[in-house]
Image: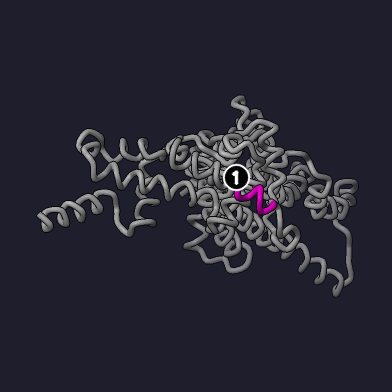
């Protein structure tokens, strides 16, 4: 395996993907994709170091080679800020995000004498050991911290989605979660390269980089808008308060009973849960209430989130259809759509969670019971 050539190809693919994400004409998750694009570009520069090293660019253009090395301190912050935008209703650029770039600025300032004179700063023996330790551990430490923060953000995102969406399969960002897991493998391989130098693992590191870039390209270029709401709905969702300690009585008792009466009519008479695009803002509009009130209603009276509350009714509808003549006319996917689900996978997973068996097993089990009764 020719590592320099493979890393050169992979870095080229990273630059192309970064460009496509930064200037995405689909206008999907715009700010998140701009930072994701910057992350991919800096990752591409990190990969480019290997072929440049074999070409001995560090001797002809030492300043350029040093600057490319410093760009690695931007990679993890760009990824984390991207995930922040993917998982947040607030799309405004916050000043506190600038602190994420402090390590890059510090090391850039530290290397300014090298850029100016082409010579490294001379230190005493003891000081040099400390400087070497900091330089050796700062980047790995940064990567570990930001990877952990990013993974935690994505885990929390799925919980938050269930507060306002009944269909999460296209907006749960599971592809980013899997990408982080691939990155974790790459980080382990990189740690081996820096600290342990196990040759068998080093040999496969370029291939891991290549796989990660093409995995990210495949999923990122077909992503959906995570928060596909208008400005009013986003503003309304932003006002949802989930901390009972800060605001234990978000809705008065009379208002709660009034909304519950309307909700029961919408569920039992109009069967709103059968609408495939039903969301918390849409349900709130039907109730003539705010998202905060509607969320509190479901959390307080039904002890559940919006996702589970709606899908329980969808599963009951699916069970009814599976045992009716409709099952002879529609396949399982047809039953899923008729019940309000958007995909067969989500339907099967949710059905098994609520009943302990797949739709097909449910039909067979109930067919056997009917025959025994006859």
Q: Is residue 306 magenta?
A: no
Residue at the spot of label 1: 259
Residue 42 visible in rendering: no
Q: Main secondary structure of the magenta part?
A: helix
The image's colouring method is: one colour
User: Which region is colored magenta?
Assistant: 252-259
Residue 182 visible in rendering: yes
CA neighbours of label 1 inside 10 A, class few (<14), some (14 to 19), many (20+) = some
Give the residue at x 49% y 56%. 203
Looking at the image, which is closer to me, 344 or 34? 344
Give the residue at x 35% y 36%. 338
| Residue 121, placed above or below residue 227 | below
Q: Quadrant of residue 125?
A: bottom right
Q: Position of residue 301 (x, y in %)?
A: 56, 56
Give the residue at x 19% y 37%. 328
Q: Position of residue 316 (x, y in %)?
A: 36, 48
Q: Is residue 210 shown left or right of residue 355?
A: right
């Amino acid at each position: 395996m020719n590592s320099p050539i493979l890393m050169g190809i992979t870095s080229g693919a990273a630059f192309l993907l970064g460009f496509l994400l930064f200037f995405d004409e689909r206008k999907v998750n715009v700010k998140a994709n701009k930072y994701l694009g910057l992350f991919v570009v800096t990752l591409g520069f990190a990969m480019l170091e290997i072929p440049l090293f074999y070409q001995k660019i560090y001797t002809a253009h030492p300043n350029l080679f040093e600057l490319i090395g410093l760009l690695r301190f931007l990679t993890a912050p760009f990824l984390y800020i991207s995930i922040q935008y993917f998982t947040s209703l607030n799309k405004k650029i916050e000043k506190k995000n600038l602190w994420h770039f402090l390590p890059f600025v510090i090391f850039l300032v530290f290397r300014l004498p090298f850029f100016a004179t082409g010579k490294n700063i001379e230190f005493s023996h003891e000081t040099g050991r400390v400087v070497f330790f900091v330089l050796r551990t700062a980047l790995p430490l940064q990567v570990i911290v930001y990877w952990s923060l990013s993974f935690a953000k994505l885990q929390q995102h799925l919980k938050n989605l269930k507060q306002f969406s009944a269909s999460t399969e296209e907006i749960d960002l599971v592809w980013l979660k899997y990408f982080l897991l691939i990155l974790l493998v790459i980080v382990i391989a990189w740690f081996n390269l820096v600290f342990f130098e196990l040759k068998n693992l080093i040999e496969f590191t370029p291939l891991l980089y290549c796989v990660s870039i093409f995995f990210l390209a495949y999923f990122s270029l077909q992503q959906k808008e995570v928060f596909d709401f208008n400005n009013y709905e986003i503003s309304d969702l932003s006002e949802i308060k989930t901390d009972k300690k800060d605001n234990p009585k978000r809705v008065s008792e009379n208002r709660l009973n009034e909304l519950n009466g309307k909700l029961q009519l919408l569920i039992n008479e109009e069967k709103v849960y059968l609408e495939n695009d039903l969301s918390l803002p849409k349900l709130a509009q039907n109730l003539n209430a705010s998202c905060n009130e509607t969320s509190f209603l479901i959390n307080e009276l039904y002890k559940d989130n919006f996702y589970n509350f709606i899908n329980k009714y969808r599963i009951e509808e699916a069970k009814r259809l599976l045992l009716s003549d409709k099952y002879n006319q529609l396949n399982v996917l047809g039953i899923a759509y008729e019940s309000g689900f958007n995909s067969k996978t989500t339907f099967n997973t949710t059905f098994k969670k609520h009943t302990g068996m797949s739709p097909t097993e449910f039909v067979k089990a109930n067919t056997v019971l009917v025959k025994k009764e006859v």
